[in-house]
Image (spheres, rainbow, N blue to C red):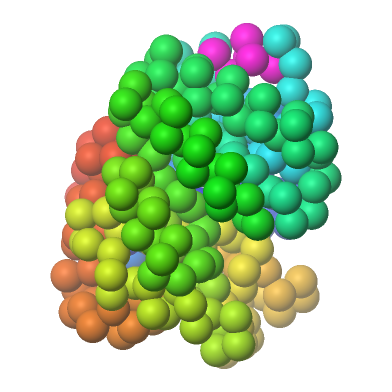
Amino acid sequence: MEWIDIGANLTHQTFRKDFSAVLERATRAGVRQLIVTGTDERESVRAQALAAEHPGQLYATAGFHPHMAKHFSSESESVLRELAARPEVVAIGETGLDFYRNHSPPEVQQRVFERHLELAVELQLPVFLHQRDAHTRFVEIVRAYRDDLVDGVAHCFTEGPEVARDYLDLGLHIGVTGWICDERRGQAVRRAVAQIPSSALMVETDCPYLLPRDVEPQQVGLPVKNRRNEPCLLPHIGRAVAHYSGRDVGELAASSAQVARRFFRIDEPPSPPA
Ligand SMILES: [Zn+2]
């Protein structure tokens, strides 16, 4: 079985010390390719650099998370544009709206989100999208650009079947994380996954965040210290997605990897040594 983690924050400082061990564990778990999330100018530059160092295995997105929108400038836009010209940068994002924490003012988030969508349209790249507590405005903005956008994925989907329907009606893909493993918060997304057609469904860890609640790091041989999520836990998440959507886990692995390769326009990696 092979998997593709479409949302890994591998530039996060918690991975700095044991990065190669993290990648090794991912490979051993069958996670063969990963998309490293760019969340602001510096992290996008780092994500691209990591991807360039691991051709065929790591890819990167370039963008500003809505929390970081207030730091976006015309210079940062030029940097994103340069990064996006690199072959290992496969999407614009992370971008979107987060009215839950409002680390950046909502008006700024909306303006920066629109700049990202314009860039994605101009460069004909797919977008990696984040939305929290901003569904209505998010849908309005995406709809305004949808006809010109090549593709989009609503990453870290945590909501129920109705919101999934809205995204699917917009022709978006949906990324599901270990949120689904949480028996308290995960009920809505558990109901939603069966409604998402395989052609629109991808899986991700969003590591180091969102350690699946039903995983004890020491039991799976992970460093306990900071209770960090890792790409090697993607198969665990995939099994939960398969379970709650009534799919066979092998078929889910194969279909989500195929969808991810088509979405991000990446090739299969060379076969691992026997
Ligand atoms: Zn996000």
Q: Depth check: 261 or 166 in front? A: 166
Classify residue 258 as left or right of residue 107: left
- Residue 64 highlighted magenta (yes or no): no
Q: Main secondary structure of the magenta part?
A: helix
* Position in image of residue 224 (x %, y %): 71, 79
Quadrant of the image occupied by residue 50: top right
Instruction: Tell me which residue sits at (65%, 63%) in the image.
Output: 209
**Vertical placement of 180 versus 102: above or below?**
below
Residue 124 can be seen in this image: yes
* Residue 53 visible in the displayed image: no
Q: Is residue 79 magenta?
A: yes
Query: What residue appears at the point 50 percent right and 38 percent down from the top-left corner?
Result: 140
Q: Position of residue 199 (x, y in %)?
A: 20, 54
In percent of width and height, residue 59 lies at 44, 37
Residue nearest the viewer, comparing 193 with 63:
193
Left or right, residue 120 beside residue 257? right
Quarter location, residue 238 = bottom left
Report the magenta residues as a range.
76-81
Q: Which residue is found at the position 19% from the left and 73% from the top?
A: 250
> Observer-nearest residue: 31 or 151?
151
Q: Which is nearer the eye, 127 or 223? A: 127
- In the image, residue 100 sits, relative to residue 119, either above or below, namely below
Tell me the quarter of the image containing the C terminus.
Answer: bottom left
Residue shown at the point (21%, 61%) measured from the top left? 198
251 to the left or right of 194? left
Q: Quick check: 65 above or below 9? A: above
How far across and down, in percent of the image, does residue 112 sit? 66, 26
Q: Quadrant of the N terminus?
A: bottom left
